[in-house]
Image (spheres, rainbow, N blue to C red):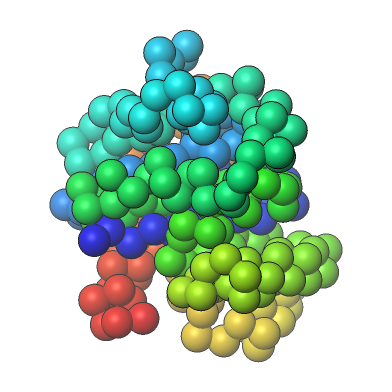
Amino acid sequence: MGRIIACSNHKGGVGKTTSVVNIGAGLSRLKKTVLLVDLDPQANLTQSFGVNNPEFTIYEALKGEHELVPIHIDKNLDIIASTLDLSGAEMELSSEAGREYIFTELLEPLINKYDYIIIDCPPSLGLLTINALTVADELFIPLQPHYLAIKGLTKIIEVKDKVKKRLNKKLEITGVFVTQYDKRKILHRDVVDTINTYFQDKVFNTKIRDNIALAEAPSTGTDIFRYDPKCFGAEDYMDLCREIIKRHENGR
């Protein structure tokens, strides 16, 4: 059975989608089968892989019009596409019975087909994110090395605790990683120390350095490894992927 990981932070601009794209691509290059799910109405993950006007998206699946239909991107790598129409899903599904479990039921037939299923959550803590946390085994939180980013963590931890208590007993925060890092900045080093103190062994050793290539890659419809395999961004995300695999192999 594949590991289901929700990647979430309701604060925008932390590199959440960039991380899902490149963790997924990195794991696939390390011979893991990967499904990425774009649960964000902005559809940035979908667009990052150059998928435009997909025939099947998660929006119609959530409405019961069809099953989840993976789109093949590269060797070992598929995605479930999103659409701007998904922005209306929370209101449309709010009156559905068992609305927190709709995505769980949709994902069930695919779980055994992949080593990793990684969900790109929207930058909010509404029904779509609740659906992701209800099906996930693990929660990854990307963080910028800014003090305001740390202060915003309280809410997502609170929501995680409620989902764990009421909907998904197995859910745990298993990975916290820092993006847009610059070791030359004292603030960044101080914030990382604070993050390490709070999350301890949940923090990945790998830090994603600030790298312009990570911002450029989506405009070409590809991941960082195909765009610029020798840049810091590719190096850091590959190191992070190796660390993720190692933790899982060690039972963490």
Left-right relation of 147 to 142: right
Assign the N terminus to one quadrant of the image.
bottom left
Q: Position of residue 155 (x, y in %)?
A: 77, 66
Q: Is residue 190 above or below residue 206?
A: below
Rendered residue at 59%/36% (across/down): 40
Q: Is residue 95 above or below residue 148?
A: above
Camera sees residue 136: yes
Camera sees residue 211: no
Q: Furthest residue to the front? A: 97
The quarter of the picture where residue 41 lies is: top right
The quarter of the picture where residue 25 lies is: top left
Left-right relation of 82 to 241: right
Rendered residue at 53%/59% (across/down): 134
- Camera-side residue of 238 and 114: 114
Q: Is residue 8 above or below residue 49?
A: below
Left-right relation of 236 to 179: left
Left-right relation of 52 to 24: right
